[in-house]
Image (tube, grey):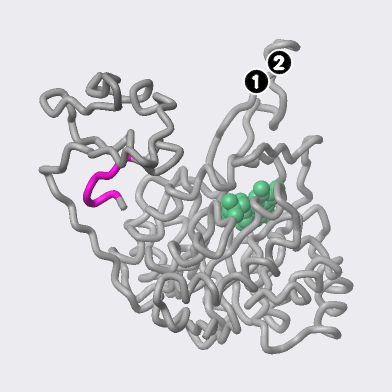
């Protein structure tokens, strides 16, 4: 029921960890295996030593900001300790995706040494810039040294996801991991008149539920532009419903990090456990059925004035407070002024008791 297959990789379920601190050594990779993740992804391995400001992870209810870079451990530690250690206890039914970065020259060093451990490679382009010819050159350098699937990870600051998709497809990659964290972003502490958190330039990168809508749109854009590419969706996933949304947008598998940082690491096992119930709730028999479902988009230009279900209304007046068109008043009961109402739908979404009805916004 939960299986998904792409580029010859067979996953027992679509959820993977995203590259980050929770997959930074052999014990953590084992944790993800024991949590039941469909595939395991490593922290990004590179050739240079990262200089990571501390603190480097800041989280609130719906977002995470980080100034972490790539793995703090050198390539040799991965090659001599973490990867052999993980290999010795590895459940071979879960593909291992090795995350690497960043330049064409890095690929020449990293891929020949890491290839025997990897079932696929994921390449962070976070610090590569916007030049698509450079990104294509990275794919070509990688392809010279491996026949395994290659997934290029796109960062939200790249302006042209469709162009990125075409460039990496033409260069020989199998797909895209969309998206990395969003930035640069900033966090200010008024009391100390200082930047609370970030790198030397004052910036950090934002992830978690707050970026989910952006990530969904990027997945959708890429899949529509280049349907033959595999898309792995990541950015803000926190529930089994979120997983289904990413698959409907065009992903074949998904990754998660930030929600587990702010809610706890048990979230991986919980989402996998919740997935069958979520599929059933929405009338799907399998993950494959979700992946193969095309997303409808029924845009209309004439909506409806809302109606009130009086038995549900608690007269909290929130709808009146939020209405941007001043169309809601109270005269014995909540009343919608049809002349002023712009049929925007905001009151429907804000009502705490679902007392406002508007066709199309069920
Ligand atoms: C603390 C932290 C460290 C991260 N490190 C990496 C990394 O080493 N390589 C990478 O490609 N992405 C890295 N990311 C980005 C995540 O893999 C992921 O793409 C992003 O956070 C969006 O997913 P999420 O909202 O589920 O966290 C990191 C994110 C965070 C929060």
User: Tag 2: Cα neighbours inside 10 Å, few (<14), some, or many (≥20)?
Assistant: few
Q: Are marks 2 and 1 in contact (CB under 8 Å)?
A: yes
- The picture quadrant where one finds residue 266 is bottom right
Q: Which residues are magenta?
A: 356-361
Q: Is residue 328 left or right of residue 244?
A: left
> Which label number is shown at residue 194?
2
Percent across and percent down for residue 8 are: 51, 88
- Is 161 in front, or is 292? 292
Q: From the viewer's perspective, tell me whether residue 298 is left or right of residue 332.
A: left
The picture places residue 28, in percent across and down from the top left corner, at: 81, 66
The secondary structure that dominates the magenta segment is: loop
Q: Earlier in the sequence, mark 2 or mark 1?
A: 1
Compared to residue 85, the image places residue 196 above or below, namely above
* Residue nearest the observer in this picture, 273 or 95: 273
Residue at position x 50%, y 50% from top? 155
Q: Secondary structure at mark 1?
A: strand
Residue 8: in sight, yes or no? Answer: yes
Is 229 rendered above or below residue 156? Answer: below
Residue topped by disc 1 = 188
128 is within the stretch colored magenta: no
> Along the line of sight, which residue is nearer the eye, 183 or 277?
277
243 relative position to 305: left or right: right
* Quadrant of the image occupied by residue 21: bottom right
Would residue 3 appear left or right of 162 to someone viewing this image?
right
> Residue sitting at 55 percent across and 47 percent down?
209
Residue under the point 45% across and 52% down: 215
CA distance separating discs 2 and 1: 6 Å
Q: Is residue 290 above or below residue 347?
A: below
Q: Residues within 10 Å of mark 1 (few under 14, many from 20)?
A: few
Q: Is residue 192 above or below residue 41?
A: above
Residue 338: x, y in percent? 13, 29
């Amino acid at each position: 029921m939960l299986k998904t297959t792409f580029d010859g990789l067979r996953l027992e379920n679509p959820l993977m960890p995203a590259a980050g601190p929770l997959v930074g050594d052999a014990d953590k990779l084992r944790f993800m295996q024991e949590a039941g993740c469909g595939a395991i992804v490593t922290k990004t391995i590179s050739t240079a030593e990262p200089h990571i400001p501390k603190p480097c992870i800041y989280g609130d209810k719906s977002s995470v900001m980080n100034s972490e870079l790539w793995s703090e451990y050198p390539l040799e530690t991965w090659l001599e300790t973490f990867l052999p250690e993980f290999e010795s206890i590895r459940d071979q039914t879960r593909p291992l995706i090795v995350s690497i970065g960043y330049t064409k020259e890095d690929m020449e060093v990293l891929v020949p040494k890491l290839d025997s451990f990897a079932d696929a490679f994921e390449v962070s382009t976070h610090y590569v810039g916007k030049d698509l010819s450079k990104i294509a050159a990275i794919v070509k350098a990688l392809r010279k040294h491996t026949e395994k699937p290659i997934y290029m990870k796109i960062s939200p600051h790249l302006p042209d996801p469709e162009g990125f998709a075409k460039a990496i497809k033409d260069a020989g990659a199998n797909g895209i991991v969309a998206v990395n964290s969003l930035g640069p972003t900033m966090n200010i502490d008024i009391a100390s008149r200082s930047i609370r958190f970030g790198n030397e330039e004052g910036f950090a990168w934002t992830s978690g539920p707050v970026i989910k809508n952006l990530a969904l749109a990027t997945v959708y854009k890429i899949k529509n532009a280049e349907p033959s590419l595999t898309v792995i969706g990541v950015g803000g996933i926190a529930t089994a419903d979120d997983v289904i949304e990413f698959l409907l947008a065009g992903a074949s598998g998904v990754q998660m990090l930030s929600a587990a940082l702010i809610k706890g690491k048990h979230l991986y096992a919980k989402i996998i456990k919740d997935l069958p119930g979520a599929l059933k709730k929405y009338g799907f028999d399998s993950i494959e059925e979700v992946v193969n479902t095309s997303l409808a988009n029924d845009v209309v230009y004439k909506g409806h004035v809302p109606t009130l279900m009086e038995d549900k209304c608690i007269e909290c007046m929130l709808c009146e407070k939020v209405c941007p068109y001043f169309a809601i008043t109270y005269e014995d009961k909540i009343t919608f002024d049809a002349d002023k109402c712009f049929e925007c739908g905001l009151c429907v979404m804000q009502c705490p008791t679902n007392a406002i009805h508007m066709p199309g916004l069920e």
